[in-house]
Structures are given as structure tokens and as C-alpha cells.
């Protein structure tokens, strides 16, 4: 026991010496972690920059494959519905496709907005000098390490669009995510009946080709089923196999009334449902996160800045107010660019209208940034404890 105590004491002594030599009251410990991780950040920035075009091609291929499969396999099922439902399906599906295509195109090819270059810094209210590009940086503008440029009201760099999301294309990004989410919900629910028909079809177990294609997304399951079926066969015959053949004969009819179902449809419907269902789940979390930021008048970068400022103010018994938040309704109107000449129809249908303002000067909500609040620290710790999004999105 004495030896363990000595080792423990020596360890704490060496740790104390190390901390005393590296302690700096003006810098947080995270600064050293960021410095050590700088090579990794540099690699990620360069990798994302080169992979951006591949991500755009991948989104285009996946979206096109869903559209093609809808026309090939879902359209015959829809044509068996009543005339009213057929019209509703075709109108709604093509409405979503039109908005998805338009907003993705505009999000990829629309610049988020670049601050005035070589302009006198005194001419831009509240501007500072960017330490990386040595140019005036207006309020809410930030420098993108991937693009190596400053952008107005930068939210984040989106690799799926190969572009930064900022002042002029923020609405396109949000609209694309929402319409894509609605589209994946529509396709996954529309093909669910066809998916269950193919996935639970008894022929999937009898036909090795169909079994491998239906279970290709779950490697190893097809081999396990094959081993089990081989074990139950006795002298080349099996009562179970005969029972499966009867199950195939008695199985429910195809939703479109087809008698001969190709293996391409079998594989395509399973792929269609799994890809749309998984994207629906991912976009649900993403849309919820961005809508929360929009309603609070923040960007993905500002949420961390405001959190840090709120913590500093709370330590001194002060509350912090986001100067760019004007209430959830006005924040939403600013993002969508709604004004007298721009109505909600410009949001529900493809429209290239610009957001209100110039992205350089921002109206202040005329509230004090800091105000006395004895319960500020308690409120801050409580909000951080229950805020799942901030816990999961500290990057």
C-alpha cells in the first residue's frame, strides 16, 4: 500500500509540475487541443474541398434513381387508384420534384455573398479586419477555411452542395432540406405496401437470386438462411420447401396486379424504401436543428459564439441578449425574404427573390446586450444541461 501511495504521490507531483509550466491564465485549455488538432483540421478542409464535386454528383445520382424507380414501379401501382388520387399523386410528386431540383440548383450555384473587397473599414459599420484574408469583415460574416474566403452571414460549409451557406443562399438550402424531407416521406409511405409485398414474399427464401438481392443491404443474412434451408432438406426433399411453395401460391396479389414480378423490381423497391426512410430520419434531425436556429435568429456559427458570450455574462451575474433576434416570426420572415412584394407563394413555389437587406448591415433589436440578472448562471447551466442539440453539435 505504501508503494502505491508513493507512486500516486509522484504522479500527482509530476502532473502539478506539468500544469504549472503550461498554465496560461489568458488562454483556455481548448486552445492547446485546437493547436494539436490543427493538422487534422487542415486535412479535413482540403479533403472536403476536393470531395465537394463528388458529393454533388452523388446527390444527383441518388435523387435521379429515386425518381426513375418511382416512374418504373410506383407509377403502375398509383394508376390502379381512383382518378382523384391519381391526380393528387402526380401533382404532389411533381410539385416536390420541381422544388427539390430548383432549390438544390440555386443552393449549389448561388454565391452566399462576399463582403466588399478593399473597402475602407470605416465605411462598414461594426466591421473588423479578417485575420486570414486581411479584408473588412462585416458583422455576422465569417471566414471559411475550406473556400478560403469570407462570406456574409455564413452558416456553414455544406459538402453536399459544394458551397458555403450564407446570406444569399441560406433560404435555398433550408427550402431544399424541407422539400427533400417531404419528398422522402412521400416516397417511403407510398411504396411501403409494395415494399412489404416484396420483403415478406415467400419466394424470397426459395429463389437465391431474389434472396441475395433483397438482403444485399444486410450482408451475411442470405448465407445464414441458405445454411438453414440446406440443413432441413432430407434426401433432396423438404416438407418445409413444399410448404413454402404453397405459401407462394396463396400469397396476396401484387399491388399493381402484376403476375410476373421481375427481380429488378424486387431489388429496386427494397432499395427505394430503405434509402428514402433513412434520409427521412437524417433530415428530420437536421431540419429540426436548423429551424431552431432560424427561429432564434442564429446561424450554426453564432450559436456557439452566443453560448460562449452567455456563459461569460452569466459568470458575472449578467444576462445576454442576441442583438440579431427579432422574435421568431420576424426571424422567419427575414430568412424567407417576405415583404410587401414577396408573398408566401414565392416560398411555396420556385422563386429567385433575394432576402431583405444587403447582408452587410443588420438591424439591431434595440435591446441591451447585457443586463443584470442574478439568476443568469443558474438559467445558463440549466439550459445547457437539457439542450441535446448543443451537446451533440459542439464541433
Image: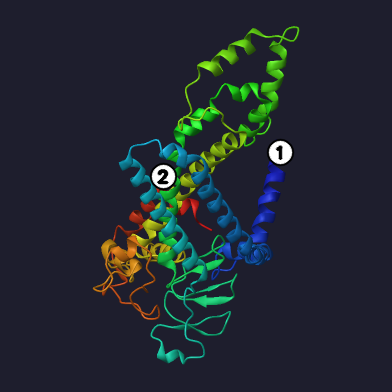
Which residue is more in the foreground, 356 or 24? 356
At label 2, counting other C-alpha atoms closer than 10 Å, the crowd grade (few under 14, some 14-19, many 20 or more) is some
Residue 299 shows in this picture: no
Measured as percent of width and height from the top left, residue 118 is found at 51, 90
Measured as percent of width and height from the top left, residue 108 is found at 52, 67
Disc 2: which residue = 186
Disc 1: which residue = 2
Which residue is more in the foreground, 316 or 288? 288
Which residue is more in the foreground, 298 or 14? 298
| Quadrant in the rendering for residue 219 | top right
Report the quarter where the C terminus lies.
bottom right
Rounded to the nearest angstrom, the CA distance separating label 1 from label 2 is 69 Å
Residue 222 versus residue 296 in the image, above or below: above
Labelled disc at residue 244: none
Which residue is more in the foreground, 23 or 345? 345
Residue name at image x 64 percent, y 7 percent: 239
Report the quarter where the N terminus lies.
top right
Measured as percent of width and height from the top left, residue 257 is found at 46, 29
Residue 241 shows in this picture: yes
Badge 2 marks a residue whose secondary structure is helix
Badge 1 marks a residue whose secondary structure is helix
Asked whether disc 1 touches disc 2, contact meaning CB atoms under 8 Å apart, the reply is no
Amino acid at each position: 500500500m505504501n508503494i502505491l501511495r508513493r507512486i500516486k504521490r509522484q504522479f500527482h507531483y509530476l502532473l502539478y509540475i506539468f500544469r504549472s509550466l503550461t498554465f496560461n491564465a489568458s488562454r483556455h485549455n481548448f486552445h492547446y487541443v485546437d493547436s494539436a488538432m490543427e493538422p487534422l483540421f487542415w486535412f479535413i478542409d482540403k479533403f472536403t474541398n476536393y470531395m465537394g464535386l463528388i458529393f454533388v454528383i452523388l446527390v444527383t445520382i441518388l435523387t435521379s434513381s429515386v425518381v426513375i424507380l418511382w416512374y418504373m414501379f410506383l407509377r403502375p401501382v398509383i394508376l390502379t387508384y381512383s382518378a382523384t388520387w391519381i391526380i393528387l399523386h402526380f401533382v404532389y410528386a411533381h410539385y416536390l420534384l420541381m422544388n427539390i431540383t430548383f432549390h438544390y440548383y440555386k443552393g449549389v450555384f448561388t454565391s452566399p455573398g462576399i463582403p466588399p473587397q478593399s473597402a475602407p473599414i470605416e465605411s462598414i459599420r461594426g466591421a473588423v479586419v479578417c485575420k486570414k484574408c486581411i479584408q473588412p469583415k462585416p458583422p455576422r460574416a465569417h471566414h471559411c477555411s475550406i473556400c478560403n474566403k469570407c462570406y456574409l452571414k455564413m452558416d456553414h460549409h455544406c459538402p453536399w452542395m459544394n458551397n458555403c451557406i450564407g446570406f444569399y443562399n441560406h433560404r435555398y438550402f433550408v427550402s431544399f432540406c424541407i422539400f427533400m424531407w417531404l419528398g422522402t416521406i412521400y416516397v417511403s409511405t407510398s411504396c411501403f405496401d409494395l415494399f412489404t409485398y416484396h420483403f415478406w414474399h415467400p419466394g424470397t427464401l426459395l429463389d437465391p437470386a431474389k434472396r441475395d438481392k433483397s438482403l444485399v443491404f444486410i450482408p451475411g443474412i442470405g448465407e445464414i438462411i441458405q445454411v438453414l434451408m440446406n440443413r432441413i432438406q432430407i434426401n433432396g426433399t423438404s416438407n418445409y420447401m413444399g410448404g413454402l411453395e404453397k405459401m407462394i401460391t396463396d400469397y396476396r396479389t401484387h399491388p399493381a396486379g402484376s403476375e410476373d414480378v421481375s427481380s429488378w423490381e424486387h431489388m429496386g423497391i427494397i432499395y427505394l424504401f430503405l434509402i428514402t426512410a433513412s434520409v427521412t430520419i437524417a433530415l428530420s434531425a437536421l431540419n429540426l436543428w436548423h429551424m431552431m436556429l432560424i427561429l432564434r435568429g442564429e446561424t450554426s456559427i453564432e450559436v456557439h459564439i452566443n453560448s460562449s458570450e452567455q456563459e461569460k455574462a452569466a459568470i458575472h451575474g449578467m444576462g445576454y441578449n442576441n442583438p440579431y433576434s427579432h422574435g421568431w416570426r420576424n426571424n422567419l420572415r427575414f430568412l424567407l425574404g417576405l415583404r410587401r412584394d414577396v408573398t408566401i407563394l414565392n416560398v411555396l413555389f420556385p422563386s429567385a427573390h433575394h432576402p431583405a437587406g444587403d447582408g452587410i448591415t443588420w438591424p439591431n433589436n434595440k435591446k441591451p446586450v447585457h443586463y443584470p440578472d442574478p439568476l443568469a448562471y443558474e438559467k445558463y447551466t440549466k439550459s445547457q444541461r437539457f439542450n441535446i442539440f448543443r451537446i451533440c453539435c459542439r464541433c
